[in-house]
Image: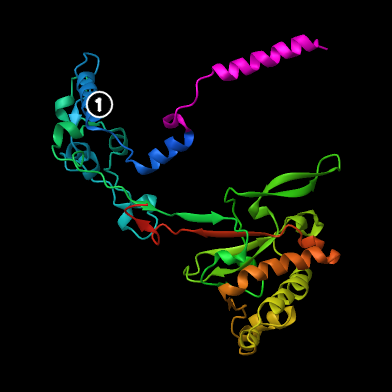
Amino acid sequence: MPSPAAARAASQARSTSRASSPPILPTERTAYKLAKQLRNFQGCTHEEHTEADRRHEEHHQRPDVYSTYSSFKEITRLLRGVHNGGTPLPNVLSNPKLMEPSALPKEVDLKAAFEGTSPRAFPKDVGTLDEKLPHNLCLQQHYNSSRKGRAAKVRFDVDSVCYFPSSLAFARNGIDWHPQAHPILNLDADIHFSLIVSAYNSRGDLVTRTLPLHKIPHYCFGSVAGSTKSLRLFIFFPELHLESQYEHTTYLSKQDQQLWLDAVLLPAIGKTVNDSTLVSYLPVSEDNASKGVTAASAEKSKRKESAREQLLEYRLQHQYLDPLWTAILDRIAENPGLDRFNNATLFVHAKNTKLAHMTNDL
């Protein structure tokens, strides 16, 4: 054990080291660098292009470099078969079917086409050091115009949206609520977000660990009104991860769907929404909701048509959303039989929104 004096000396040394270390400049902070990269155009400068051209020219002037400059037209001579005795390669892109080996012309010199060398196509190379070397494309030598001098345009877009709201009230235009859980709407791929769940380790001890969202039981509560259905709202149930029935699936079981609707969500809606006209349009039980989504498919089944569930939705107005989420959490906390829904977490997600949210400025 170190003496008290030695401990104090070590502590003073650490304090002196921290005090003597220079502060990090604002321009060196990671957040600043990320913001600068986002705001500014990322590309080569004119000076960098000029320096690259100079090094390229010097390279070809070396005595040990023999390959000459070539243009697109010269390089594609073998592919187009325009040289003496040449045969063009088949245009496989214009053929709607896979080409049979027998359809390949026997005159095609595949080795020359893919290696870029041919005495017939480039007779001037015969007897020189370039005879067995492929031709190199050089844009600088053969093409004078380029986009190098054009001013760069910067555009911003939102490719996806992910966030954890603390209440349903974030949806200012309301929520189009799905009364039934539809497995097809569940997350099935990693979107690089996780939650803390309880789990058993290899020794059988109950511990906590982080788990990707797509591996936690959840369902799509609905979509945010006014978002063209692209912004979906999910409710995750981390406590259900311990259940054996959710070992290989994240879809809510029939029993949990019924318990969630009949004991939590529908009573919370009844307590919060005081508009009798609006309530009259909403389902009153899980059984009522499940029959509603399959009513049309049942009729189609009788007519021997494809039987599928409808994606029914009901608009929940914004003024009810904040007290509704509070009522949901209160019901779970006040009823021990509902502890399987503890730590219910809201998550909003939208993907492939690049074309819908594109602008010239932030």
Q: Quadrant of the N terminus?
A: top right
Measured along the vertical axis of the image, is residue 31 above or below residue 361?
above
> In the rendered view, does 66 fall on the left or right side of 218?
left
Q: Which residue is disc 1 drawn over? A: 52
Q: Residue at x 50, y 24 (%)?
A: 23
Nearer to us in this view, 106 or 9: 9
Nearer to us in this view, 208 or 101: 208
Q: Which amino acid is tagged 1?
A: Ala
Q: Residue at x 68, y 82 (%)?
A: 283
On the image, the x and y values in percent for residue 274 come to 66, 82
On the image, the x and y values in percent for residue 264 come to 75, 71
Nearer to us in this view, 6 or 153: 6
Is 7 within the magenta? yes
> In the rendered view, does 259 fall on the left or right side of 305?
right
Measured along the vertical axis of the image, is residue 104 above or below residue 176?
above
Q: Which of the 4 image quarters holds residue 68?
A: top left
User: What span is colored magenta in the figure?
Assistant: 1-29
Nearer to us in this view, 256 or 52: 256
